[in-house]
Image (cartoon, rainbow, N blue to C red):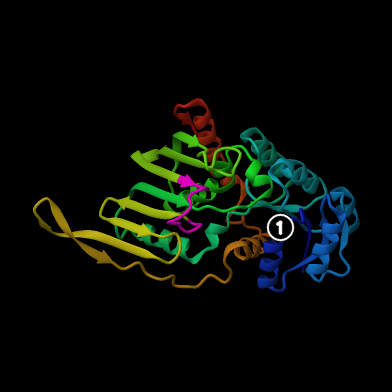
Amino acid sequence: MQTAVMVGCGAMSEGWLRAIGDIGEGVSLVGFVDLDADLARRRAKQAGAVDAVTGTSLDEVLGRTRPDIVFDIVVPSARAHVVETAFAAGCDVLSEKPMAGSLAEARHLLNLRAAQGRLHGIVQNRRFLTGIRRAKAFLESGAIGEVAEIHCDFFLAPHFGGFREEMAHVLLHDMAIHTFDAARFVSGILPRRVVCLESNPRHSWYRAGASASALFECEGDITFGYRGSWCAEGGPTSWEAGWRIVCSKGTLLWDGNEGFRAEVPGKREGLLARMVPVDVPALAQPLPHQGHAGVIADFLEARLSGRAPLSDSRDNIHSLAMTLAAIDSAERGEFVSIET
């Protein structure tokens, strides 16, 4: 049984507790840390961890529990300190995204991880959804040729309250990274530069950056376009975005979940060809766990097997680089190179 301390016991931690419950055996929560001591105690009680150590000091709780893993669910500005503290205590870390507030900070954490021989995973829970695995397998099969263009639309209107509504670049920094990472995972694109226009509509209840459009130029003359808004009432997409993936032999339309439509050209009639549907096969093997539960289960198995987790920080830095470059472009009003 692997042991873990949960640091950051706010609303998001409830989802983690549900995911850990879905996994069942494999990990035991031995400590809970939050700036609000009462909240840490409530999460321990909610988890049924009657013997867990709770407190406001991560150092103190780690010293008393000596866990294998730290589950890092803190606000992004506190992430680097939590990860550094956990590594110093000999713990592997599974963090919420983003992995860092800057590329310099991300590189520092990667160097620290390498020097101390630790694992560091980042929660990109879309990688553990049946739909995204199905889309990835279909594209890799070559049924509609090679990827040429990816177009993603994300339009929702969540009223979170709390820190998100006060963030700068809220859509790009807190949400678009999921779609950017999914695009990398599904298609294997290698983005090289980006231009981005960001706005905050007058009706927005966010402080800044609730809407954005970004165009990425990728290796192999592939383009990836993103349009999104977090204050778009009506006509919602899924949380996983709506996709059009244009390939050399056909097109895949995908709602981000289980809605698939693929077509290739058949007999031509004048200017246009009649489209012929192509089956998008179901996964040969169902995923044992999805979403957060999938990320956590994969991380636990990676620790036991010695392999890298699917959401390894050494890979995730590339998704972070896309996000930070888009933000930089929005601020500068020009194309920005993407470097890690």
Please say if 117 is above or below 144.
Answer: above
Count of all numbered marks drawn on residues in the image:
1
Check residue 137 for magenta coloring. Answer: no
Horizontal and vertical percent position of residue 131: 46, 64
Position of 159 with respect to 72 (left or right) is left
Q: Which amino acid does label 1 sit on?
A: Ala
Please say if 292 is above or below 79.
Answer: below
Disc 1 crowd, CA 10 A, few/some/many (<14, 14-19, 20+): few
Magenta region: which residues? 228-240
Please, what secondary structure does the residue beneath circle 1 have? helix
Which residue is under mark 1?
Answer: 11
Horizontal and vertical percent position of residue 168: 61, 37
Position of 249 with respect to 176 (left or right) is left
Residue at the spot 41% in from the left edge and 55% down from the top edge = 242
Q: Which of 317 and 158 is in front in this view?
A: 158
Horizontal and vertical percent position of residue 68: 78, 58
Q: Nearer the viewer, residue 92 or 37?
A: 37
Which picture quadrant has residue 172?
Answer: top right
Check residue 229 for magenta coloring. Answer: yes
